[in-house]
Amino acid sequence: MRRFQITISKTVAAGILALVLGALPAPAAKAECQGKDGGSSLVTGIDGGETLILEDGRAVRLIGVMGPRRARSGPASDARAKMEAALKALTLGKKVALDLGERLRDRYGRVLAHVAVLDKGEAPIWIQEELVRAGLVRVISFKDNRLCIDALLAAEENARRAQKGLWETGFFAVRPAEAEDLLFRLENSYEIVEGRVSNVAEIKGRTYINFGRNWRRDFTAFIPAKSGKLFRQTARNAAQTGSSLADLNGKKVRIRGWLKNYNGPSITVTHPEQIEVVNDKAAMVR
């Protein structure tokens, strides 16, 4: 089976692409996606900002990334338009290769894949990584689709530190865990929340990562009992110490996911890639 290697590009395409994405930092390494071979085809259209329409009839949803959500007007629609323009400039009319993740299709029948542009004579350009590095999308992962998330998280960290794209405008932001009122207002939005863990508690198989002492108001990350097995398995497979959930106690941590309000703002965590230990990548729970 063919396994394409996605190489982080050293330059960005000229013309409109340069205007949309701006200057990107030169990468220091290459990232590899080695999922299932999804074949290749020509991109004939863009649908909804994160979906490519291929000449062979397939609709391909870019996995691992999510752009700003669409709004009728204002900052969200402007940010979305910029992201869609970048995706068109990168892919429209070009041949792309697909690498499939664990889950092959979504509920709409779209193929779920990492995508690389195959320009003649050039190294493949990993589309997800380019958009993350430009600050036009954030990283999102799912329990049944975790391929290449570590590499994308590293690219997002660099974009955030360099204040690229929507990180510079403030449209993308890391929310403080202690800002409960703000988090309440952001219910049903996809967010990254950062704070220091007050304690980690397991109750009837469920794990609660608490960021305060008032459990009815403070931000909490909730791990369902059915997801605990995955965390225990990754902890056993980890080659470093400090990789269990209990070891998060007292550490500064980022949680990413969809915000809900239940006994305070909370995010349900189903897999390790939703948790990052800040300024300590070696201790990342993965």
Image (cartoon, helix red, strand yellow):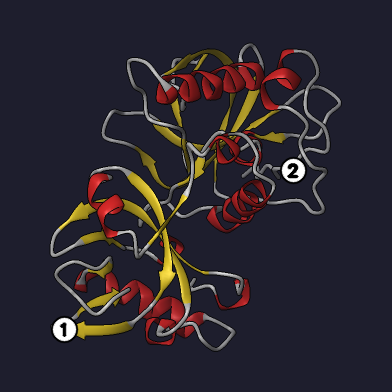
Asked if one can make out residue 52 in the rendered structure from this viewpoint, the answer is no
Above/below status of 200 relative to 252:
below
Q: Quadrant of residue 70?
A: top left
- The outermost residue toward the right is 121
Above or below: residue 33 compared with residue 222: above
Q: Dot 2, crowdedness within 10 Å: few (<14), some or many (≥20)?
A: many
245 vs 40: above or below: below
User: Seen in the image, is 105 located left or right of residue 281?
Assistant: left
Categorize mark 1 by other alpha carbons within 10 Å: few (<14), some (14-19), many (20+).
Answer: few
- Residue at (61% x, 54% y) in the render: 157
Question: Along the horizontal axis of the image, is 163 left or right of 246?
Answer: right
Which image quadrant is residue 230 in? Answer: bottom left
Q: What residue does disc 1 label?
A: 203
Residue at image position (40%, 85%) is 249
Q: Is residue 124 above or below residue 145?
A: above
Viewer-closest of 253 and 202: 253
Which residue appears at 56% of the width and 53% of the height? 148
**Looking at this view, is 49 or 190 the one in front?**
190
In 3D space, how far apart are the residues under numbered discs 1 and 2 (Cα atoms)? 43 Å
Q: Secondary structure at mark 2?
A: loop
Q: Earlier in the sequence, mark 1 or mark 2?
A: 2
User: Can you identify the residue that label 2 sits on?
Assistant: 8
Estimate the x, y position of residue 90 in percent, counting from the top left: 66, 22
- For this view, does 189 lie left or right of residue 76? left
Q: Please, what is the three-letter code of the amino acid marked with disc 2?
A: Ile
Q: Position of residue 95 (x, y in %)?
A: 66, 20
Name which residue type carries label 1: Ile
